[in-house]
Amino acid sequence: MDSKKELAKSFSNKIDDKCPKDGLKALHVCGTHEQSILKHGLRSIIPGRLELKMGPGCPVCVTPAKEIDEAIWLAENDVTIATFGDMLRVPGTDKSLFDARSKGHDVRMVYSIEEAIKISNEVDEVVFFGIGFETTAPSNAAAVLNGLPNNFSILTSHRLIPPAMEALLNIEGVDFDGFIAPGHVSTIIGTKSYNVFSQKYGMPVVVSGFEALDILYALLKLTEQVDANTSKVENAYERAVNEEGNPKALEMLDKVFKTIDADWRGIGTIPGSGLEIKDEYSRYDARVKYDIDIEDSRDIHPGCMCHLILTARGKPTDCSLFAKECTPQDPRGPCMVSREGECNIWYKYGGKDRESKD
């Protein structure tokens, strides 16, 4: 047995020793965590009475249909849309950006805002549909601060993780005992951003990396807190995360964006959870530049359980559409589209949450 397997077994045994006999529910909010959990079969390693849930950790999944409809409206009105590949198939109210492209509208997949800016040399008008959490927003802020072409603007759809975590504490039927916080987001915002959970709610938080051993170690620290009846913010990812975060990135976000109440698909409006371009940079805001006309939108389609899956009130296998009418090739809901979506991840690894695929 190699050292990693020995260490994993040691962590598992210690978790078993500390985990309350009546069970413990841990909730993470990161698609990359869920990928690692399924890839390495971590739910089959930890004791069965430790339930590991996923919340709204996929930015593509929580982008509301209205904002996708806005991007489609722009494409249908002769504006070139550039966005990440996962966004093309996410359903809006009646159709997706992929559907718009198939009808001849100019919708392009890019890997960064820099790539989108280059497109401005080829077309009359281009809008970058910029989505993501605190990890992707700084690159868009930097682009704004550097100056953008006159024919380039941004349709922002940025969301903030801590307000969503706090919202989960107030949703009926969402039941858990502590958070496993996302490593990537935490590199930007720092561990101090989670203090509200231990101080106001008595909810333990452990920041975790993404390797199997990182997650097992974070779960051990969480079970130790629960066993000791304590609640604090612990950093189990010290090689990448500190208390203050990334000051330069945070400064750029503060210069370019203002915090707003924002809609999350399947969840509703969460106070202070979105970013909007400030007035002094409104010339780069697609919603200011264009008179976008969107009527009523619909986030969740009949039969889809994404609203329950995104709030840790259901699992992909609870949904009657999962792996039947809803697949990555023909997704019915947003959770099946993105590689960070829980349904997509479960589909990839066989739709089973307690068996290793290694």
Image (cartoon, helix red, strand yellow):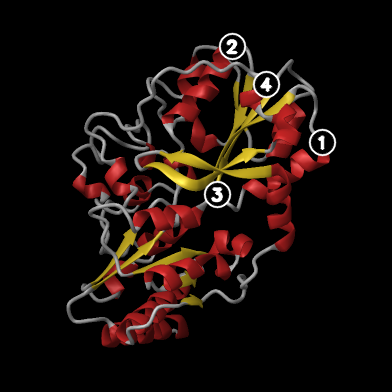
Q: Amino acid at mark 4?
A: Lys
Real-space CA distance between mark 4 and mark 1, rounded to the nearest whole angstrom: 16 Å
Q: CA distance from mark 2 to mark 4?
A: 13 Å
Crowding at mark 3 (Cα within 10 Å: few <14, some 14-19, many 20+): many
Sooner in the amino-acid sequence: mark 2 or mark 3: 2
Residue 288: percent from the left, percent from the top?
A: 65, 24
Which residue is rendered at x = 25% and y = 53% of the image? 172
What residue does disc 3 label? Answer: 133
Q: Secondary structure at mark 2?
A: loop
Label 4: how many residues lie within 10 Å, few (<14), some (14-19) or many (20+)?
few
- Give coordinates of residue 55: x percent, y percent: 37, 54
Residue at numbered disc 2:
77
Q: Is residue 266 left or right of residue 274?
A: left
Evaluate whether residue 215 shows in this view: no
Where does the image place residue 117, in percent across and percent down from the top left? 74, 31
From the image, tell me which residue sits under label 1.
Answer: 147
Q: CA distance from mark 3 to mark 1?
A: 22 Å
Q: Is residue 165 left or right of residue 275?
A: left
The span from disc 2 to disc 3 (Cα, nearest Å) is 28 Å
Indicate which disc, 3 or 4, sits on the residue closer to the N terminus: 3
Task: Say if 279 sits above or below 275 in the image.
Answer: above
Q: Residue at x 30, y 48 (%)?
A: 309
Labels 4 and 1 touching (C-beta < 8 A): no
**Crowd class of label 1 (few under 14; some 14 to 19; many from 20; radius 10 Å):** few
At label 2, the amino acid type is Asn
Does the image show residue 253?
yes
Please report whichever mark, 2 or 4, sits nearer to the chain's N-terminal start: 2
Identify residue type, mark 1.
Answer: Gly
Which of these two is toward me, 299 or 108? 299
